[in-house]
Amino acid sequence: MIAGHSVAVLLSFEGPDRYSSVGGLGSRESSFARALGEAGVDTTLVFVGDPGLPAVEKLEEHVTLRRWCQWISSYHPRNVYDGEEGKVNDFAGSVPAFVVDEIVAPAAARGERILIVAEEWQTAGALLNLDATLSARGLRDATTLLWNANNTYGFDRIDWNALRQAAAITTVSKYMKFELAQWGIGALVIPNGIHEELLEGPPRELVARFRAALHGKPALVKVGRFDPDKNWLQAIDAVAELRAMEFAPQLIVRGGREPYGEIVFEHARRRGLRVARVEASGDDAEAVASALGATDADVVHLQAFLPEPTLAALYAASDAVLANSGKEPFGLVGLEVMAAGGIPVCGSTGEEYAEPFHNAIVCDTNDGRELAEYLRASFGDEVRADRMRVAGYATANRYLWQSVLETLASKIAYAERSRRP
């Protein structure tokens, strides 16, 4: 149980499917659901799933996946946000009745309490409708409703007055708490967590294979959507600056399909960097390593969907992982890098766990020269690098879901007491 709740429902657009996992939210929802299940809470994750997969799937003993909007997704096969408007409306109109009829009402009849956590602006309408339906059915007191903000996207589309009447509002960092305050909203901070299995690290032989493929060159990795907020141009500028310092780093990029990617690569060419597009089957780690080993380009655009073990091995094999966003609500990637034994480069917004030159490299600006200087000081200093890797691993241990769920329980208890007249 979590604060007296033996049943939980998570409402999210993103989820564990490749179709549904675009940013960090998919990873959060998957590991959050697993953590609740492992705590003995019967958990249902409702998300916009792959139209070609089963509508209902048992992920683990206490975790059930419910893929929603599949009839719409079949017309929009690119990813979860393809056809977004129609999905938002369908989600808001059809999810509440399902949750009330199939989950809340039976659990309440058994005398159980139900925790419902909705994520991001796309689910706000569904949560408002759910609150109204629960109240009409006399079931609202059997539930705890939370709405969680992982980012500021869509804030202008939310009816904030209605939302704060319907649910307790939470967020993932003090930075995001400040962002919500700009909209007149007070929020409870509950950080993201990572699953303890990440601490086992990637297979050593795979890490060694990637290091061999990099041919001893300083290696930088950057993974994420092609979005200006991710400071892609700073990463490119840093590589160019390092080359001018007579280093020869290789930047390995795995981005999305966003048009901004072409701006990034054109900027690299203008800075005199060689760009290569490399395709490989992400399900075959050896194929990825071979593809990387076959190019000496300064910037390698890796076209592959990388499963978690492969991605973690790449993190561990590199000299640094550039999670250098200019606006980062939490920075889950940084923790995942630390858990894998890598060194993250973070920005200075929501990554409250990042301590400069202790467990991470932290940039205060979007200037490529700042990033280049910090990387230059780290290249070749194995003592410093090992110290940061060890400290980072210890930090990752502090953000396991077991600890985060304790924070969640305390915040739920407060939210419930404050809701009572």
Image (cartoon, rainbow, N blue to C red):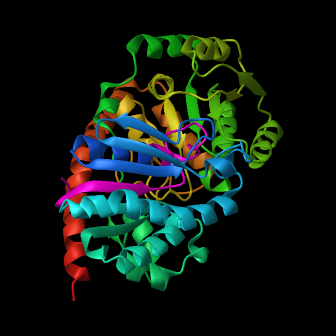
Where is 148 relative to 133, above or below? Answer: above
The residue depicted at 56 percent of the width and 61 percent of the height is 91
Q: Quadrant of residue 118?
A: bottom left
Q: Is residue 330 left or right of residue 280?
A: left
The residue depicted at 58 percent of the width and 19 percent of the height is 217
Q: Quadrant of residue 358?
A: top left
Where is 242 relative to 69, above or below? Answer: above
Tell me where residue 129 appears, x and y as whole percent: 48, 74
Where is 302 relative to 195, above or below? Answer: above
Q: Does the segment drawn in magenta span residue 146?
A: no
Q: Does the segment drawn in magenta span residue 9?
A: yes
Residue 170 seen in this snapshot: yes
Q: Is residue 405 left or right of residue 323?
A: left
The residue depicted at 28 percent of the width and 48 percent of the height is 42
Tell me where residue 265 appears, x and y as whole percent: 77, 39
* Foreground pick, 363 / 196: 196
* Foreground pick, 332 / 16: 16
Please identify the residue farthest to the bottom as the structure is shown.
421
Tell me where residue 126 appears, x and y as whole percent: 50, 68
Residue 172 seen in this snapshot: no
| Quadrant position of the C terminus in the picture | bottom left
Where is 167 relative to 2, above or below? Answer: below
* Foreground pick, 314 / 26: 26
The residue depicted at 32 percent of the width and 62 percent of the height is 104
Q: Quadrant of residue 88?
A: bottom right
* Foreground pick, 415 / 211: 415
Q: Is residue 388 left or right of residue 272?
A: left
Tell me where residue 293 appears, x and y as whole percent: 64, 13
Q: How many marks?
A: 0
Residues drawn in magenta: 1-27
Q: Is residue 6 left or right of residue 90?
A: left
